[in-house]
Amino acid sequence: MHQPAIEFFTASDGYRLHYRRWTAANDRPRGTIVALHGIQSHSGWYTATSRQLCEAGYDVLFLDRRGSGLNERSRGDAPHADRLLNDVAQFLQWARCANERGGQAVPMILLSVSWGGKLAALTAARRPELLDGLALLYPGIRARIRATATQNLKLSLAEIGGAQKKRVPIPLQDPSLFTADPDWQTYITRDPLTLREVTVGFLLANRQLDRQLLDAPDCIVCPTLLMLAGQDRIIDNRATRGYFLRFASNQRKLIEYADAAHTLEFEPNRDEAVQDLLYWIDSIS
């Protein structure tokens, strides 16, 4: 059974980012999948899907966002939106160059789940040369849970007051928001790497990302897959579908799993979703 290696990538500012590398057994992988997790999760949540993708012949590089998962430095913090985007772009560029040096001109797929969809969509819009396909799984681009006008005002005042390092709880503490499965709810609750708090600086970066996302659809031209969970209590599926239909890409595919809760990884539909994902990757490769 495949197991991941824990490896490191150093960003341009010196921050060392952990990632889980799943290496396909065959000599020539069918492609490379770079994956991004959600606001609270980390690469360790997605072991089953990563293993299935690997066993199907794909290398999977699942990056832990700075301040999340195995990255203990500056826990829950981000200096600004561009730093988070640069981390993704630099990692993609490094992975693509590594493939080329190894004589492997294979497709590069950027896969994201939940909040990571913000980073993935903006990377696809800004750096289209770095990826050959974009997979957005229940992306956090349009969420049901959003900051109120009062909360936005407080955030602006905190920025003016220099309180960027102040920590606040993430408003997703109820594990039933992620899955209806009680065993997986217990896993989320007990997982020591699950992120519970972020800084004001991260929330400011998040707001910057939201503003930049407004114009991103016109610049997303690569083949794109959107997967939605029909019973999602975190994502606004209707608004997300509308956003997706604005993409400039002429290769768009939408799949919705009517009975699934937010995190497909923890739902009975997981194997079906992975097979659908593999079929889509094969179709664009």
Image: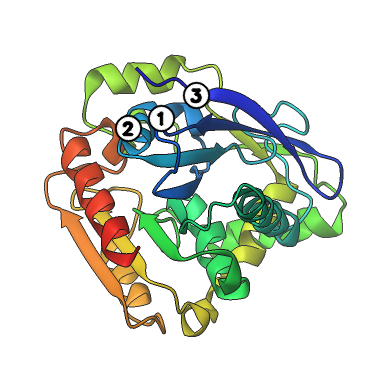
Looking at the image, is 244 positioned above or below residue 42?
Answer: below
The type of residue carrying mark 2 is Glu
Of residues 108 and 90, which is closer to you in this image?
108
Of residues 252 and 180, which is closer to you in this image?
252
Q: Which mark is residue 249?
A: none
What separation in Å lies between label 1 and label 3 (alpha carbons)? Answer: 12 Å
Q: Which mark is residue 55?
A: 2
Of the two numbered discs 2 and 1 on the same chain, state the one appearing first in sequence. 1
Residue neighbourhood size for the residue with mark 1, other residues' Cα within 10 Å, grouped as few (<14), some (14–19), many (≥20): some
The type of residue carrying mark 3 is Pro
Q: Give percent across and percent down for residue 179.
A: 27, 33
Judged by depth in the image, the label closer to the viewer, 2 or 1, is 1
Q: SS at mark 1?
A: loop
Q: SS at mark 2?
A: helix
Which residue is the site of mark 1?
A: 25
Residue drawn where x is 26% and y is 17% of the image: 183
